Image: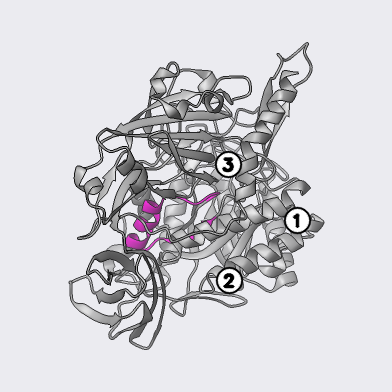
Amino acid sequence: ETGSQSKRAAKRVFLAALCSVCQALQGGMLFPTESPSREVKDVSGLWSFRADLSPERSRGFEQQWYKSPLAETGPVIDMPVPSSFNDITQDAKIRDFIGWVWYEKDVWVPARWIQDQGTRIVLRVGSAHYYSVLWVNGVKVTEHVGGHLPFEADISGVLRQTSGSACRITIAVNNTLTLETLPPGTIQYMNDRSRYPAGYFVQNTNFDFFNYAGIHRSVLLYTTPKAHIDDITVETTFSDNIGLVSFNVSVLGSSKPAVKITLSAQDGRCVASADGSRGVLKVTDVNLWWPYLMHENPAYLYSMEVQATAEDGQTDVYTLAVGIRTVKVTSTQFLINNKPFYFHGVNKHEDADIRGKGFDWPLVVKDFNLMKWMGVNSFRTSHYPYAEEILQMADRHGIVIIDECPGVGIKDIRSFGNVSLAHHLTVMEELVRRDKNHPSVVMWSVANEPASEMPPAGFYFKELVSHTKSLDSSRPVTYITASNYARDLGAPYVDVICVNSYLSWYHDPGHTELISLQLNTQFDDWYGKYQKPIIQSEYGADAVPGLHSDPPMMFTEEYQTTVLQNYHNVFDQKRKEFVIGELIWNFADFMTTQTITRVVGNKKGIFTRQRQPKAGAFLLRERYWRIANETGVLPTWARYPCL
């Protein structure tokens, strides 16, 4: 039967992926930048695109579409990269497509790259959701399991074997989610032939955002010398006016490289230098990296230039932005540079009209402008790692980040098995490897609202948190729990308790008079049990823009602001004790799958999907600036943001 064949095909599709998740990671993941020794060529733009609409979604592999131009295999359409493919066309089959899609682009590689045998040529995909296979000129060069994080391959050999013609890049991407993926999901086959045709299936998930798919971030070609800087790890601290920058540089392709480190201030002055691949830089009269609205000179970044010279004299140069700051957690406080920090911020999504989750610079800059206008000092990358460029923006603007992996919707007991855990550990390794040097990242979040009351969850999260701490001991670890989980088996292992609750929305809808009692009970119960600081990591209510009523009713802007005000009254009491932050759900409206509980997406944003403010945005702006002004360290312009 076709349904059974499809099941077997789906199993084959993921077999290789699931076998590979336990393999050790190789090498670093430095963001591609140009330098005297490196060049970057962005090959984003318009690509050829074809969805494999065959019943088993396997025709592309059976017919080896990667061996010839994609247009020769059948009809292709234009597809912008980066973007999600879902909302680009007028075809509902493409919007809701589950399975393999194929991308292809011909690009010219500079002749000098190929002719210089000492040049290493790397192809890097910033993110493709979910499982990707990549070919160059018909030769498979790599594959990657998981969306939201980059992968790359050295394609020097392939290009030199096939030089003289354009480089044909083919990427096959499958967005199917299973019980072992992050996030997990299930494929449900509908076998009632009186209602569904043969082979009909749907993708089920346990998360409340649309499963956008495609190549979501830039595709880059970049070069390094054969002997090259592969990875840099920086950790910082300070004592009095002396900053300390510990560094560890990994160089590949040379057995005894000469490594020189130079740290420069923003005015170009060299403030410290050292020789060797490992050591400590001492910076006198240090400028610390401070969060936005916490200091008159926030987000100070030094520039660390790393030079690695091989035995043959070939030199590689890489420059890394470095913010010197510390992060500590006590039983009641979160400390940045030994001073209490209170998270007043937002949760976000990489989500916008047409582009879906595709990276878009105008949207990123607009969002940062809106956050700073509102007095936001932090956000959480719900529910997956965001683009590296967003973290770089946060570094430059002093916006603090809780960096979350894609572990959302872990509800089925089968998703706590060994295969899932191995994949989850690998994802955290990839995340830490990518984001470890960003001063804006102050905490790792390993999951969102998992079924942590299930018996396997205790061991699962003990291993996950322990492994994450072994990768980076300088940042605390959390995962996001739900207020109604009284038996949370993972909470003992985290450093900060992050709680989501939607009082008077999902619980006792319409009864805002209950928020104060229930929220106080929530906080007291969690703190009484674990004696750890608490962040209200989600709260809010849907508001359809322009819908009003008095007295407030659900889905109106007035009701959203009433819910927020009732939460804020409790926050103001508890932040004097052990509550260290509040993150509204959500910054902006976002798309979800079609259900009877969602009217063209989730409307809990304080901005519309088009980034226009609702009443809640003005309420939060007044509140966040008032909280920031209480510190008394802001310059005059910041104390009066309306001027």
Disc 2/disc 1 C-alpha distance (Å): 28 Å
For the residue labelled by badge 3, is the local secondary structure a helix, a strand or a loop? helix
Location of residue 600 in the rendering, given as x and y in whole percent from the top left corner: 54, 28
Percent position of residue 5, x then y: 71, 24
Residue under pointer 3: 559
Mark closest to the chain's N terminus, 2 or 1: 2
Q: Is residue 81 left or right of residue 623?
A: left
Vertical placement of residue 170 versus 113, above or below: above
The magenta stretch spans residue 400: yes
Binning the other alpha carbons within 10 Å of mark 3 as few (below 14), some (14 to 19) or many (20 upward) gives many
Residue 573 appearing in the image: no
Q: Is residue 172 magenta?
A: no
Q: Which residue is mark 2?
A: 470
Q: Quadrant of residue 73?
A: top left
Query: Do callouts 3 and 1 mark residues in contact (Cβ within 8 Å)?
Result: no
Question: In the figure, is residue 339 to the left or right of 120?
Answer: right
Q: Nearer the viewer, residue 280 or 64?
A: 64
Q: Position of residue 553 (x, y in %)?
A: 61, 36
Q: CA distance from mark 2 to mark 3?
A: 45 Å
Compared across the picture, whether 561 is left or right of 506 comes to left
Q: Residue at x 26, y 53 (%)?
A: 117
Q: Amino acid at mark 2?
A: Ser
What amino acid is at disc 1? Tyr
Residue at position x 48%, y 71% from top?
341
Please identify the quadrant where the C terminus is shown.
Answer: bottom left
Residue placed most toward the observer, 16 or 236:
16
Q: Secondary structure at mark 2?
A: helix
Residue range (magenta)? 382-404
| Residue at the disc numbered 1 | 485
| First of labels 3, 1 by sequence position | 1
- Please name the amino acid that badge 3 sits on: Tyr
Q: Report how far apart the C-alphas of labels 3 and 1 lie in the structure.
A: 26 Å
